[in-house]
Image (spheres, rainbow, N blue to C red):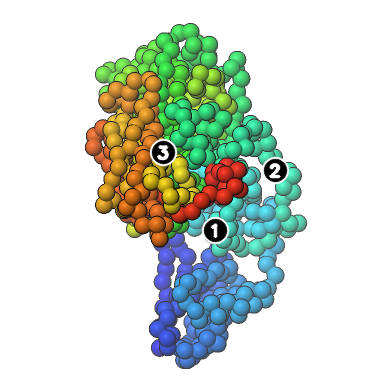
Amino acid sequence: MLRPFLTHSARAIDRVALTGRTAHGVSAASVVSVASAARPAHWQEHTLRAMSTSATIDEGSGAGWARLAAAVVAAALAGGVTWTWQWREDSVLLRMAMPTIHTARCEDAERKQYTKEEVAKHKTKKDRIWVTYKSGVYDITEFVEGHPGGSKRIMMAAGSSIDPFWSMYQQHQTKEVRSILEQYRIGDLEGGAVDEGSVGDPYAEEPDRHPALLVRSQKPFNAETPRVLLGEQLNTPNDLFYVRHHLPVPHISAEDYRLHVEGEGVRAVTLTLEDLKTKFKRHTVAAAMQCTGNRRHELKMVKNMAGLDWDLGAIGNAEWSGVRLSDVLKYAGFDSDQSPEVEHVQFEGYDNDGAGTVYGASIPVHRAVNSHFDVLLAFEMNGEPLPVDHGYPVRVVTPGITGARAVKWVKKIIPARNESPSQWQQRDYKSFNPAVGPDDVDWSSAPAIQDVPVQSAITDPPSGSPVDPDEDELVVKGYAWSGAGNGIIRVDVTLDGGRSWTSADLMQHGIPQKRGSAWAWTLWEATIPLAGADRSQPLEVAVRAVDGSYNTQPEEAAPLWNLRGVLNNAWHRVTLRWGVEDEEAKENPEGLRTESI
């Protein structure tokens, strides 16, 4: 017997849920979500009437399920509301109902037309918050507070088009995001979509990039280093260093560049690039930098989540040259002993979204003022002026800290009592229990990621590579790194799931890496005997690293899963096959052949 019931969601979306069990024991569910500001009060009556007329259907009848689903959808449509529906992947009978539901949707009456002037009247919760996207009109009042980017940013589009914002934040341009928006559709824009040609492309002046980079998104541009190139030299070439952007790249000349120091405990100071080069002592630091989402792809294989599909190349190592942040803060009069209320140093970049939002981040004040931590305002990378993609003219380099805090094109330095209010400090780059999802996350319950855990990966050979059955040894290469200056003391490689291990030879950086300030990565190489390997089965190679505090990597990725897909440092694995490499593979090494993972 089917049991209808009503629930009310936390986002004030009324849901009618129907649950039942088929004669074959297959669970089935259909959810009709109603999200309309002007829905008639009697819509529930219509829906319940439709449900009651269908509640006696044979539970083993696919046609009956189709009639039931269609009846509920029809009732919602009759009430003049928008709707979406979902079904469990194992629900065979509801998948049979899909054509009926699609038919009901296609027969929906013509949507109401709204003018731009009508939309413009809806800018507040009191009047309802409406936006347009292409030709659609949407009432997003209930969604605003739950917007992952915060309510402030989405409210900039209230009463108008979100098209220019989605042009800026192109992570919205996915089927999943558009389907969420569609739930809030209330009609169409009279005259159709805004001419896209009138919406300027903020990414029109992006710099040229090396074609070997593996592109993960074009706007904003994000790309990683091919894995086969990562382990070749201690310093990653500038043109092949991974690129991580959140906003369009700003173009600032050396002559026009200004750095502003302001905030608590300092006198306001403005410095030019020439000032930085002539008024402060120059320092060079060898440091790795890693995107917080490096190796997210492996977590997505456990369970999908939002975020760029990074493989293992969102990391690199460079020699950064510039001036110490501690010296600049001292020049501006900052003394942490005299300003104990200051707990953070915030950074803001010149990159912005055209509507007032800039990229920002912060680090704990003790990391900023203590020269031991080597935080730099860098203007050179590997002996050359910073490339535009990496922050020219000046960027922050935060050794041992996740790359999200190393603000490029830095414009402001702000000692403050609180962390940066930036979206990327407050509502991103945090990790949560695997049970926490995007609908129930409390961003304030977790600290912003700073130091990163010990990490290692195999760069050569890549998965799928052949191993000659006649060979007695296998040579494996890769990188290892740990945050907080811990350095790497050992790298272990196994061919049998951890029953036996081979220690790798370590290649340390030429610039001395002292304990507690070992910021550079370590390249490693292991030669592993193949005498006991089972040549009838694929060969799995796994690696783990141990840092100077004897932290090591967990074995599996699944327990590390989190809704943002960050901080994956599980053992890295590649699976090899027994055989001889063909000529085509020799000419097209993995990592240079394709963008896909």
Residue that extends furthest to the front in the rendered view of this protein: 470
Of all residues, the one furthest to the left in this rendering is: 550
Which residue lies at the image location 53% right of the left edge and 65% below the top edge?
A: 35
Please name the residue that numbered disc 1 is placed on.
176
The residue type indicated by label 2 comes to Val
- Can you say whether 233 is above or below 431 in the image? above
Query: Number of labelled discs?
Result: 3
Q: CA distance from mark 2 to mark 1?
A: 23 Å
The disc, 3 or 2, on the residue closer to the chain's N-terminal end is 2
Q: Name the residue nearer the viewer: 333 or 212.
A: 212
Q: Position of residue 321 (x, y in %)?
A: 46, 18
Judging by the rendered image, the residue that carries numbered circle 3 is 478
Q: Nearer the viewer, mark 3 or mark 1?
A: 3
Residue at 31% from the left image edge and 31% from the top image edge: 487
Position of 515 with respect to 195 (left or right) is: left
Q: Identify the mark at residue 199; answer none if there is no mark.
A: 2
Q: Residue at x 46, y 72 (%)?
A: 88
- The answer for how far apart the CA atoms under marks 3 and 2 are is 45 Å
Report the residue at 28% width, 26% height from top: 516
Q: Is residue 529 left or right of residue 95?
A: left
